[in-house]
Image: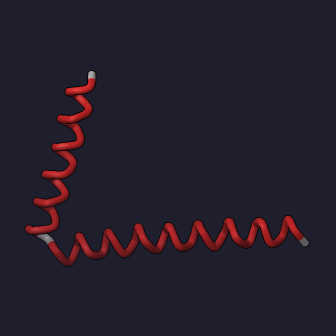
Amino acid sequence: MKWLKGIAVALVVIFALFYMISRPEDAANVVQGAFGAVVSATEAVGRFFSSLAS
């Protein structure tokens, strides 16, 4: 099973590199979207704990 996980990770990395090379603008948009989602989730957690504390 470990080798299957290694193959899956390798395929994901190869696909990500191919996507970055063939469509750099789209890849940048994906990264920006993911970063925005993380920031938004962090702000939501902060608001939750602020509301909980007050």
Report x, y in % for residue 11: 16, 44
- Residue sitting at x 83%, y 70%: 51
- Residue sitting at x 20%, y 78%: 25
Q: Residue furthest front?
A: 2
Relative to 32, say whether 5 is above or below: above
Q: With 28 as the anchor, is 32 left or right in this view? A: right
User: Dividing the picture into quarters, in which one does residue 34 lie?
Assistant: bottom left
53 or 11: nearer the eye? 53
Report x, y in % for residue 49: 78, 66
Relative to 54, say whether 2 is above or below: above
Report x, y in % for residue 7: 17, 35
User: Dividing the picture into quarters, in which one does residue 53 lie?
Assistant: bottom right
> The C terminus is located in which quarter?
bottom right
Q: Residue furthest top?
A: 1
Report x, y in % for residue 28: 26, 75
* Number of marks in the rendered image: 0
Q: With 2 as the anchor, is 54 left or right in this view? A: right
- Residue sitting at x 53%, y 73%: 39
- Residue sitting at x 27%, y 21%: 1
Relative to 14, say whether 19 is above or below: below
